């Protein structure tokens, strides 16, 4: 007896149609089951909203007279560890790496007490404007954690565990040539998505503002020490100018809240979900199921070949 398809046969559409017609119930069943499962999966996914802020690096004019002074006093300023170039040290790529860093995000989580909203939230009740928490791991009424602790962990999650979950909700894009920075946050609640992206921008600016203030104070202390040691009037005059500019820089950092990034387009409360794309999930589920059903039919035909009459 010979197989339905022999090596010498010409592969034609009629042969393939006959093969698939023989195993049509496998094709139909597998495709149908996969499509139904994809529909249920798409329907079970909670809506996720995205809020976005577009920011730019501060303009040179906001640095006052520091950029003009840098050419004259650059050598001494560099020796003192002073930056006179405004926001040049706050590159967009540097900011992007900062936001993605574990230390920054864990501090962000702890400062704003976001553990439950990150680790236990599974949806959002639009009518009540409340987050929906998984009752099996967190009791919202008593604010008690009920989860089974992972190996080596405690029942109450830490910011270490929450870090990768939050990082997955943050989207960053730095357009260095344009000096633009796009920051967005995904969440089940559109209100929290908007709130968190605004908090992130605020914390970024606070981080750089505090660092600038710390560096400025250290620079002033260094310059005053150098002033006491020098006896040359010209050098003293130069140091006085540097101290004056550092004091101006310190005052500027106190006044300017958007120190590293200035808001170009503020966060807007999203009304429509960003994802999941349920129709796309269903279509992909049907396509993948169809491909799997074809493979199953081919395997079944190999294992159980159709016998045919022998040729004379």
Image (cartoon, rainbow, N blue to C red):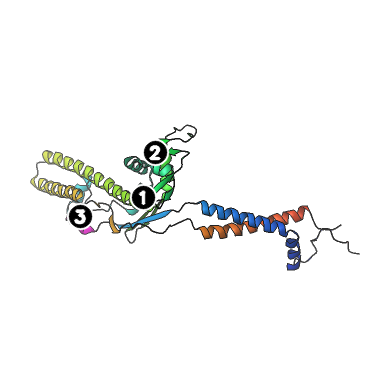
Q: Position of residue 161 (x, y in %)?
A: 43, 39
Which residue is situated farthest in the right direction here? Answer: 312
* Image-based side of 232 in relation to 24, left or right: left
* Image-based side of 48 in relation to 201, left or right: right
Residue 10 to residue 34: above or below? below
So how many labels did they put on this image?
A: 3
Which residue is situated farthest in the left direction here? Answer: 233
The answer to the question of whether label 1 and label 2 lie on touching residues, with beta carbons closer than 8 A, is no
Dot 3 or dot 1: first in sequence order is: 3
User: Helix, strand or loop at disc 2?
Assistant: loop
Q: Residues within 10 Å of mark 1 (few under 14, many from 20)?
A: some
Q: Position of residue 47 (x, y in %)?
A: 45, 54
Which image quadrant is residue 140 in? top left
Q: Residues within 10 Å of mark 2 (few under 14, many from 20)?
A: few
Q: Which residues are magenta?
A: 58-66
Q: Position of residue 98 (x, y in %)?
A: 35, 47
Depth check, mark 1 against mark 2: the one in front is 2
The residue that disc 3 covers is 63
Residue 155 to residue 178: above or below? above
* Image-based side of 188 in relation to 40, left or right: left
Dot 1 or dot 2: first in sequence order is: 2
User: Helix, strand or loop at disc 1?
Assistant: helix
The residue that disc 2 covers is 141
The residue that disc 1 covers is 192
Task: Name the one closer to the observer, 163 or 122.
Answer: 122
Which residue corresponds to the image point at 42% horizontal and 50% vertical from the top-left? 124
């Amino acid at each position: 007896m010979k197989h339905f398809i022999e090596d010498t046969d010409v592969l034609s559409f009629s042969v393939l149609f006959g093969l698939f017609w023989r195993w049509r119930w496998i094709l139909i069943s597998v495709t149908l089951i996969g499509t139904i499962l994809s529909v249920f999966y798409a329907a079970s996914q909670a809506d996720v909203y995205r809020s976005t802020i577009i920011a730019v690096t501060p303009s040179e004019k906001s640095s006052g007279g520091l950029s003009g002074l840098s050419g004259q006093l650059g050598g001494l300023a560099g020796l003192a560890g002073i930056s006179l170039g405004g926001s040049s040290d706050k590159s967009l790529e540097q900011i992007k790496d900062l936001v993605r860093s574990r230390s920054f995000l864990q501090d962000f989580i702890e400062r704003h007490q976001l553990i439950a909203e990150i680790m236990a939230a599974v949806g959002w009740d639009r009518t009540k404007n409340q987050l929906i928490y998984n009752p099996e791991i967190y009791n919202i009424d008593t604010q008690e954690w009920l989860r089974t602790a992972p190996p080596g962990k405690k029942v109450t999650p830490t910011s270490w565990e929450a870090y990768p979950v939050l990082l997955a909700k943050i989207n960053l894009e730095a357009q260095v040539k344009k000096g633009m920075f796009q920051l967005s946050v995904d969440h089940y609640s559109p209100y929290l998505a908007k709130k968190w992206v605004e908090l992130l921008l605020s914390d970024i600016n606070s981080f750089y503002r505090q660092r600038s203030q710390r560096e400025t104070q250290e620079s002033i202390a260094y310059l005053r020490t150098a002033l006491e040691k020098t006896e040359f009037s010209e050098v003293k005059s130069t140091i006085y100018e540097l101290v004056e500019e550092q004091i101006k820089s310190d005052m500027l950092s106190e006044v300017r809240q958007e120190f590293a990034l200035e808001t170009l387009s503020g966060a807007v409360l999203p009304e429509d979900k960003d994802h999941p794309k349920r129709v796309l999930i269903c279509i992909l589920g049907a396509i993948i199921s169809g491909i799997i059903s074809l493979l199953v039919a081919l395997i079944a035909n190999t294992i159980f070949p159709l016998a045919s009459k022998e040729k004379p």
